[in-house]
Amino acid sequence: MKRIPVLVGCLFLGVFGGAQEIDLPPETAERVMEAYQKEDLDRVIELTEGIPQGSRWTRIRASALQRRGEQRFFDAKIAESIADFDAFLAIVPEQDPYHWQRGLSYYYAGEYEKGKAQFERHQTVNTQDVENAVWHFLCAVRAPGGSIEAAQKDLIPIEQDSRVPMKEVHDLFAGRGTVDAVLSAAREDNDGVLSERERNHLCYAHLYLALYFEALGETEKSADHIRLAAYDYAMDHYMGKTAQVHAKLRGVKPKP
């Protein structure tokens, strides 16, 4: 997904500077800061439990919840990731339209109607993202009453996503493209040497081909492509890790 920002950081000058009264006892505040700097997210969340809404410390709590939700997703703990994302959004509800991460978790939790609605809200703040259109499609297919034909008819139109191979991915899900076109767009003529850029393109290509075949119910083809995305062309960004989560949840292992 395009990196439309969700609040994940904490500006320590904004939290710890200034003359305003702190809402935590000094010793607790020190422990929170130490835990946050050590990335002990569980401890931060524990120490800030019950902090009043509007306190400067809620920003640290929100950041810890968002980051732990992401980590739980990467660990394939889908229900737990949704719980953390929900808690994050309870603190900063204005971030809801930006929260495509919860949409991915909804898909893997089987909460397809919620996922579809999340991606519809994300479309209002990220209007030219093929990935958002595709995840909306995937949820629409599996939501009650959904079908491939209806999802194709309602596929969100995207005209300006220049990332490779997103145009070809969108065409495929729209029913006017091909698997070969997606793979051809992702490959580079580099004499057999795999560049980091090509690895990234192929990771995306095979992830979305795996999801496409999953939507069609073709599990073997889906497994073949997710194996490539998760292992052969593994990447360490959010969508690369999503491919690995998908493989784990679907029981797809690397070839021996």
Image: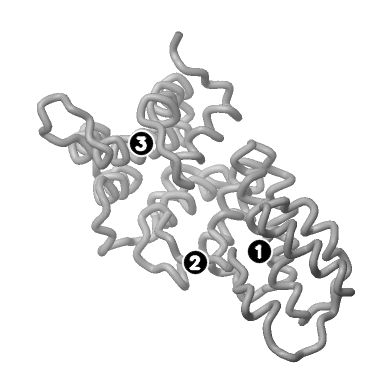
Q: Mark 1 sits on what residue?
A: 63
Q: Which quarter of the rendering shows the C terminus?
A: top left
Dot in front, 1 or 3? 1
Disc 3 residue type (three-letter)? Cys
Give the x, y percent position of residue 56. 73, 79
Residue at left offset 78%, top offset 63%: 32
- Lower position in the chain sequence, tag 2 or tag 1: 2
- Secondary structure type for disc 2: loop
Q: Please report contact status of discs 2 and 1: CB closer than 8 Å, yes or no.
A: no
Count of numbered marks? 3
Give the x, y percent position of residue 14. 64, 80
- Secondary structure type for disc 1: helix
Q: Mark 3 sits on what residue?
A: 203
Q: CA distance from mark 2 to mark 1?
A: 12 Å
For label 2, count other residues whose C-alpha is less than 10 Å away and answer few (under 14), some (14-19) or many (20+): few
Disc 1 residue type (three-letter)? Ser
Q: CA distance from mark 2 to mark 3?
A: 22 Å
Q: Nearer the viewer, residue 142 or 17?
A: 17
- Lower position in the chain sequence, tag 1 or tag 3: 1
Q: Which quarter of the rendering shows the N terminus?
A: bottom left
Image quadrant assignment for residue 204: top left
Disc 2 residue type (three-letter)? Pro
Give the x, y percent position of residue 149. 42, 45
Colouring scheme applied when the structure was drawn: one colour
The numbered mark at residue 5 is 2
For label 1, count other residues whose C-alpha is less than 10 Å away and answer few (under 14), some (14-19) or many (20+): many
Residue at left offset 70%, top offset 78%: 16
For label 3, count other residues whose C-alpha is less than 10 Å away and answer few (under 14), some (14-19) or many (20+): many
